[in-house]
Image: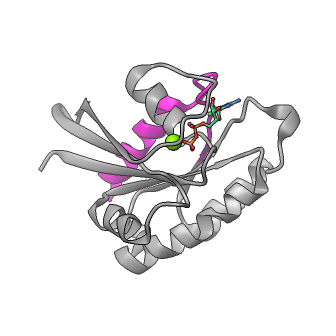
Amino acid sequence: SNDYRVVVFGAGGVGKSSLVLRFVKGTFRESYIPTIEDTYRQVISCDKSICTLQITDTTGSHQFPAMQRLSISKGHAFILVYSITSKQSMEELKPIFEQICQIKGDVENIPIMLVGNKNDETSGREVETSDGEALAKRWKCAFMETSAKTNHNVKELFQELLNLEKRR
Ligand code: GDP
Ligand code: MG
């Protein structure tokens, strides 16, 4: 089918909802509103046809384990977000990546994008770009730094994920 399901994971506060809202609605808010779990649909053109991008914005690390397993089984592609201002948020992605491996098996064939968000916060940086690149290399996945606030690399993130899918 032309339905393409993308799941966004990451610790609370790293900017998952902000990235999704920036992409889907073009907006940004400074306040933090914890997410339950939300799904957004965006019709996009791909390969001269039209497909529906279904983006699931998860609650982060406090997601119920059964819900997390279900999101992974249903997902076609994954965005794993940390904040460049928090080393801890990068650590919190590791068990999620491992669970994706367990459930999906051959992850090399699954589009995964590791994302270092908040790259506008240069003075609070705790994670170097090279740390992100190194982790992505270890995980054999793609990598990008973004800012939902300044709209840096947000469109590119979703576009690149679709390109990864087409390359499979
Ligand atoms: P989530 O828990 O991962 O969904 O995080 P949110 O999207 O709710 O964002 C948490 C907080 O970080 C909010 O106060 C946002 O305004 C802020 N935030 C999100 N993305 C960025 C960003 O790219 N740069 C900066 N400076 N702040 C951001
Ligand atoms: Mg959220």
Q: Identify the image quadrant of residue 148.
A: top right
Q: Identify the image quadrant of residue 122.
A: top right
Residue that sits furthest to the right in the current view: 123
Image-based side of 21 in relation to 136, left or right: left
Residue 105 visible, this angle: no
Split into quadrants, the picture shows ligand 1 in the one at: top right
Report the residue at 35% width, 49% height from top: 6
Q: Is residue 114 above or below residue 101?
A: above
Number of marks: 0
Q: Is residue 73 above or below residue 145?
A: below
Tell me the quarter of the image containing the C terminus: bottom left
Q: Position of residue 45 (x, y in %)?
A: 23, 30
Residue 48 visible, this angle: yes
Report the residue at 34% width, 61% height from top: 71
Q: Position of residue 95 (x, y in %)?
A: 57, 72
| Closer to us: 151 or 50 | 151
Q: Position of residue 68 (x, y in %)?
A: 40, 65
Report the residue at 51% width, 34% height from top: 19
Report the residue at 29% width, 50% height from top: 5
Magenta residue check for 1:
no
Image-based side of 102 in relation to 142, left or right: left
Image-based side of 85 in relation to 57, left or right: right
Q: Is residue 88 above or below residue 73?
A: above
Q: Identify the image quadrant of residue 133.
A: bottom right
Query: Which range is magenta?
Result: 144-168
Q: Is residue 122 above or below residue 63?
A: above
| Closer to us: 79 or 110 | 79
Image-based side of 13 in relation to 49, left or right: right
Q: Position of residue 126 (x, y in %)?
A: 83, 49
| Colour logic | one colour
